[in-house]
Image (spheres, rainbow, N blue to C red):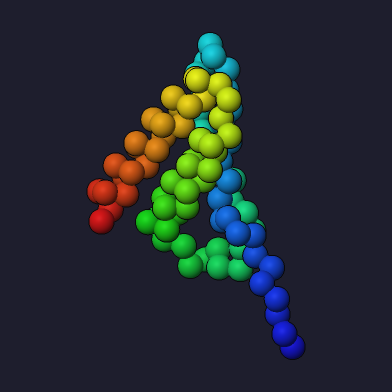
């Protein structure tokens, strides 16, 4: 039996949510994957960084861009601490 590549190209998607009054934040959704059980913390953080970078391309609001930039900084710092 031949199995075609049917996984989504991205493992994690990112979105901004919240209001201006309560603060905005970035949330993540895991895309169903064949290899869910084999992800360690470093792989998840790398996927979150890629998801934030994709999200940043489509951000229209300056507040969203600032929130995404802050999240990217935090994720890169966390990744540096893990390595």
Identify the image quadrant of the C terminus.
Answer: bottom left
> Is residue 35 visible in this depiction of the protein?
yes
List the single residue furthest toward the right: 1
- In front of the other: 60 or 48: 60
Residue 35's place in the image compared with 44, above or below, is below
Name the foreground residue: 22 vs 50.
50
Residue 15 picture location, percent across and down: 58, 36
Quarter of the rendering occupied by the N terminus: bottom right
Q: Position of residue 47 (x, y in %)?
A: 47, 52
**Residue 28 shows in this picture:** no
Q: Quadrant of residue 31?
A: bottom right
Which residue is drawn at the image coordinates 53% and 43% (left, top)?
Answer: 54
Q: How many marks?
A: 0
Residue at horizontal 44 percent and vertical 24 percent from the top: 66
| Percent x, y of residue 46 | 42, 53
In the image, residue 39 lies at what x, y percent?
46, 62
- Residue shown at 47% from the left, 48% from the top: 50
Note whether 5 is above or below 63 in the view shown.
below
- Classify residue 59 as left or right of residue 69: right
Instruction: Say left or right for 73 vs 54.
Output: left
Left or right side of 4 for 75: left
Q: Residue furthest top?
A: 21
Question: 29 and 52: which one is in front?
Answer: 52
Q: Residue at x 41, y 50 (%)?
A: 45
């Amino acid at each position: 039996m031949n199995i075609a590549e049917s996984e989504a190209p991205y493992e994690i998607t990112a979105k901004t949510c919240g209001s201006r009054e309560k603060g905005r934040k970035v949330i993540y959704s895991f895309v169903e994957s064949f290899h869910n059980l084999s992800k360690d913390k470093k792989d998840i953080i790398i996927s979150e960084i890629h998801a934030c970078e994709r999200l940043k391309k489509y951000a229209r609001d300056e507040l969203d861009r600032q929130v995404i930039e802050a999240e990217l900084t935090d994720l890169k710092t966390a990744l540096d601490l893990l390595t």
